[in-house]
Image: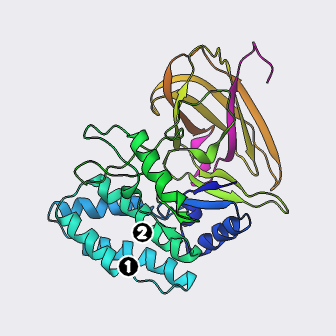
Amino acid sequence: MKKVVKFGGSSLASAKQFKKVGDIIRADKSRRYVVPSAPGKRNKNDTKVTDMLYACYEAASTGASYGKLLSAIKERYEQIIDGLELNLNLDYEFKTIEENFIAKKGSDYAASRGEYLNGIIMSHYLGYEFIDAAEVIFFDENGTFLSEKTNEELSERLAHTERAVIPGFYGSNPDGTIPEVEMTTQGIGGPISPFYRMDAARACLLSGNVMVSVRRPDNDIPVEYLAGIRDGDHAYWKYYDFTGTDADRFICKTWGKNRAAKIEIRLDGPEGELLGVCDLTPMEGEVAYAVHETKIKPVTGKHALVLVFKAVEPADTGDEDLMNLEWFTFSTSHTPR
């Protein structure tokens, strides 16, 4: 069996996290192909490398001062390299990135460099071959994903590659430019069924303080979840197809310490159509967990799902976290859960 494993930004935010990921990959010899994200937040007050790249590109492409921004990005990667004790230098890659930023290669190119650089580091750390996604993931001039061409090229490449690291979220256009793939939860597959139990950590867009974290139960598989959730934060999962499902209930699992809070279930945006509100009661304890549910109004069609997190008493919460969200799903009164 050949397995593909994907790791999010929080799981690859530091050398310490890299080592944990390395242990997970090496624990199963069938985990042969690795898809890394760009480094995420190392703590609640940190900045994701993707956001740093956007800011640096904006400055460089408009003629503003960008040197400090680029140096800060380079330092993030050097800290990971040093922590892993790798004999690796990214000076050439950063020189190329700087030249392309000045040449206005586009914000998609800028964002893709986070995954690209992390992929290079991961390949050196694991001893796997590095395959640039731009060489095997293709789009046409209209930005449409070319699945047949991609599958043909990728299959040929992997047929001769025992183990590889392939960065996620970008590919190449016919003119050689690099588009960023829309970040969705469904990937290149079809829309998600509302009855699928969704791991909250698969959110494709996080806003506010919320971040992906990992808990490691003794003698069990590590579990990713959304942590650091505060009043007003929200997260997206794209795309759900509610057509013909008769979904009428929302169910979710939280664990650990929770404050009294509400989860607004909305469509297509944090101010989008409100399907329902799930109330969470306060809960204490490191291993405590609870399953919450609420009714939702009828919905049909394909939508982005957005959960908006609200404190019951915002004035009293300050900067305290509201909850840890592990998973959620929908159900219908017409079928057993």
Instruction: Quadrant for residue 53, please give it.
Output: bottom left
Q: Residue furthest left?
A: 63
* Mark count: 2
State the residue at coordinates (69%, 65%). 24
> Is 55 on the left or on the right of 77, as rendered?
left
* Residue 32 coordinates in the image, percent (x, y): 62, 62
Write the start and end of the magenta stretch as one range: 313-337
Badge 1 crowding class, 10 Å Cα cut-off, few under 14, some 14 to 19, many 20 or more, is some
* Three-letter code, disc 1: Leu
State the residue at coordinates (58%, 29%). 265
Q: Is residue 36 visible?
A: no
Is 301 inside the magenta-drawn segment? no
* Residue 184 coordinates in the image, percent (x, y): 48, 41
* Residue 138 coordinates in the image, percent (x, y): 36, 47
Say whether marks 1 and 2 touch (CB < 8 Å). Answer: yes
* Three-letter code, disc 2: Leu
State the residue at coordinates (52%, 71%). 123
- Which circle marks residue 116 in the picture? none
Look at the picture and state if 279 lies above or below 182: above
Which residue bears the numbered disc 2?
A: 117
